[in-house]
Image (cartoon, rainbow, N blue to C red):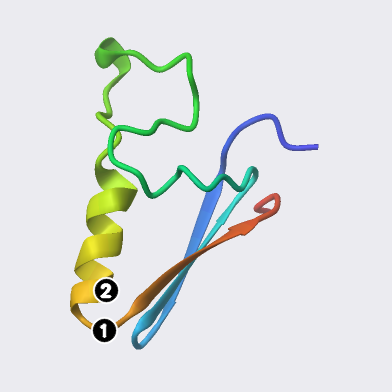
């Protein structure tokens, strides 16, 4: 079982696939953080995937999230 939130990203032309341990509908929302124990001291405002999704969609691409452990 995975104890972290490892990520694997695959891209192929206009498609980006993100593999994470835990799938959530909120992950592409601004200010959302996967781990609730993160603070301002550890960094991250929760904009990363929201902005990434907007950029990919602006270029007629898709960004998809898949649950599962990453080896």
- Residue 39 appears at what percent x and percent y? 33, 13
- The residue positioned 30% from the left and 34% from the top of the image is 46
Q: Check the image and report above or below for 65 versus 56.
A: above
- The residue positioned 69% from the left and 29% from the top of the image is 3
Along the line of sight, the residue nearer the viewer: 69 or 59: 59
Locate residue 58 relative to residue 3 in the image: left or right: left
- Residue 71 appears at what percent x and percent y? 68, 53
Q: Are marks 2 and 1 in contact (CB under 8 Å)?
A: yes
Q: Quadrant of residue 45?
A: top left
Locate residue 42 relative to residue 19 in the image: left or right: left
Q: Quadrant of residue 57?
A: bottom left
Along the line of sight, the residue nearer the viewer: 3 or 24: 24
Along the line of sight, the residue nearer the viewer: 15 or 4: 15
Badge 2 density bin: few <14, some 14–19, many ≥20, Cα 10 Å: some
- Residue 59 appears at what percent x and percent y? 20, 81
- Residue 24 bears which disc, if any? none
| Location of the N terminus (image quadrant) | top right
- Residue 57 bears which disc, if any? 2
Along the line of sight, the residue nearer the viewer: 41 or 48: 48
- Residue 69 appears at what percent x and percent y? 70, 49
Q: Check the image and report above or below for 23 versus 45.
A: below
Q: Secondary structure at mark 2?
A: helix
Locate residue 64 relative to residue 53 in the image: left or right: right
- Residue 60 bears which disc, if any? 1
Q: Secondary structure at mark 1?
A: loop
């Amino acid at each position: 079982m995975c104890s972290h939130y490892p990520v694997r990203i695959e891209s192929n032309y206009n498609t980006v696939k993100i593999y994470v341990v835990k799938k959530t509908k909120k992950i592409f929302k601004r200010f959302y953080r996967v781990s609730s124990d993160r603070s301002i001291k550890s960094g991250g405002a929760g904009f990363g995937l929201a902005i990434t999704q907007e950029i990919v969609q602006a270029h007629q691409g898709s960004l998809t999230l898949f649950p599962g452990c990453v080896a």
